Amino acid sequence: MSNQSESPNPTSSSNKITLKTSDNEVFEVEEAVAMKFCTVKQYFDDENNNNVTSGTSTTLIPLPNVESHPLAILITYCKKHLEIKANNADNKKEMEIDMEHYEREFLKNVMPQELTELILAANYLNFKEALDFFCRAVASAIQNKSVEYVRKFFGLESDFKPGEEEKLREEFAWSFEGVDED
Amino acid sequence: MTILRSSSKLEPKDSEEADKNSEPLIPGLPDHIVELCLLRVPYPEQPLVRSVSSSWKRLITDPTFLVSKNALSLSLPYVFVSAFHKSTARIQWQALDPRSGRWFVLPPMPQCPPGFVCVSLPRRGKLFVLGGVGSDTECSTQSTVMYRSSTNQWSVLSPMLTPRSCFAAGSVNGKIITVAGGGTSSTGPITAVESYDPEGDTWTPVANMGTCLKRYDSAVIGNKMYVTEGWTWPVRFSPRGGVYDPDCDTWRDTSQAMREGWTGLSVVLGDRLFVISEYGDCPLKVYDPDCDTWRYVGGQKFPRGEMNKPLAVNGVEGKIYVVSFGLKVAIGKVCEVGNGDFKVEWEMVDGPEAFHDFSALNCQVLYG
């Protein structure tokens, strides 16, 4: 995914906030985007930074627990989220449909390993909508799958005692029918 | 937590178990985030989650899991139906996801004496099957079994104090109340009432109803349980009934208008009692407690032509679920249109081919 966030939006006159990742990349984002990251917002509230309130210069915020790759994706997601919300301000249903459509497309470009990175970043930034979305994505990734698929997906091994697993399978036989191809 | 007598065993609390507890649910992710993910797996997929690893199984079978799911508004209602299969003479439970129309068959009950009565604690994902007539003795039994959605297992609980079949049961304030019914050959019909506390797995006798009824229907409205005889042939006497208040442990009479208008299957939505009348066009009625009168519900007519008897009914969150022969389900969306009037819209979910000769016995709604 490209780092779209670095190109400033010429039509917007709002403040810019600069985020610095653990791998020393610098992202300049709109204040509205940065404020969706509660950790960043908290930083402002705590610091009561004069530069921000004066609205003239940008502020640099270090994010020692976030790498540039997931942050770039989260910024893209956040921008789109705000855009969809603004476009459908008076129609909640339309907004949900647009958001669902965007999220479906979004997931097509996300690899399973990336999902873990994104969850950790969203969790650190305390970006609630994204965390909820990624948790839903994990939940739907395992739906209709086999036990083997789920274990492989997450790098897990069965720790059931011999016989216990067979019993579980027998007991829950109905859930193993009609699963998707791995 | 409920003490389970048979099919579920207590987890051993040895050192090996403690080691397992420290293993992450998913390597590389904090456990509380994995929990947030697994909370979003819908109930029908949970057996898969339980089979992945013992730490996953432990997480989602813990009673607090459903509490968190409820708190985050992630739990959804499922329609549980017990049905009699004519050709094999077996009773089978299955659950419908009303959003997808998919059915799931539950494991067989440990015992299923005919004439049993069902009641549930929907938010706790617990369904109780009580009493019934023992097949060997042809006498009423004290049988108490419970299904838990989070384990997908049945367990046998403390038996009722009184053997009974064909009685009234309801859940009030998290407790189960069983009322009167048929007893054994030596006791005959009984009037005894008892209350079950799921926390302590104990039954306690409470105030008797006083009279035996010919048959029983009941509804819990607020924290009171209404019991009625309904109209029985020959229609010579006005139906009898009563209302039990568990806070005061007293019975009193219900109004005559309420009893006489209770002419079919009942279901409670919010604090309103609805009845699908067994007569005529099967109109849907709602009881207005302020005016002590029944009103017809507007909107669409109940699709009675498509719904072959016997019918089982339940409801939750403004929706009535009626299950017919062949497990065809009519979902009635009820909304208030002002002035105490309601209207309904019906939507049909066809029963799967595999259930074409199943008769619905009972319908419960559980959250999962």
Image (cartoon, coloured by chain):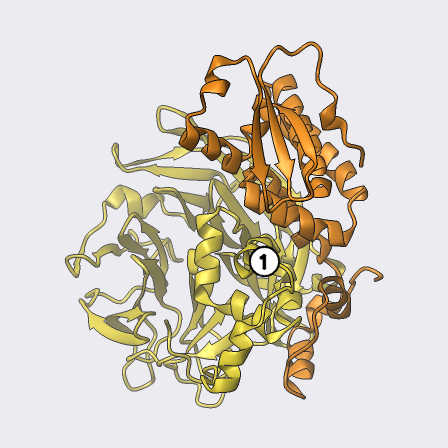
Chain colours: A orange, B yellow
Residue B227: x, y in percent? 30, 56
Above or below B163: residue B310: above
Q: How many dots with numbers?
A: 1
Between A165 and B260, which is closer to the camera in this rendering? A165
Kind of residue at disc 1? Val
Residue B95: x, y in percent? 60, 60
**Would you identify the image quadrant in which residue A105 lies?**
top right
Q: Is residue B315 visible?
A: yes
Which residue is label 1 attached to?
B34
Q: Chain of mark 1?
A: B
**Would you identify the image quadrant in which residue B176 lies?**
bottom left
In-image side of B302 versus B254 (left or right): right
Task: Report crowding for label 1: few under 14, some 14 to 19, many 20 or more residues within 10 A (C-alpha).
Answer: many
Name the residue at 42% across, 38% down. Answer: B285
Name the residue at 47% across, 68% down. Answer: B62
Residue A171: x, y in percent? 64, 77
Name the residue at 23% across, 49% down. Answer: B254
Quadrant (top left, top right, bottom left, bottom right) of the N terminus of chain B:
bottom left
In-image side of B255 versus B57 (left or right): left
Above or below B119: residue A70: above
Between B310 and A117, which is closer to the camera in this rendering? A117
Q: Is residue B304 visible?
A: no
Name the residue at 45% across, 24% down. Answer: A49
Above or below A77: residue B331: below
The secondary structure type at the circle numbered 1 is helix
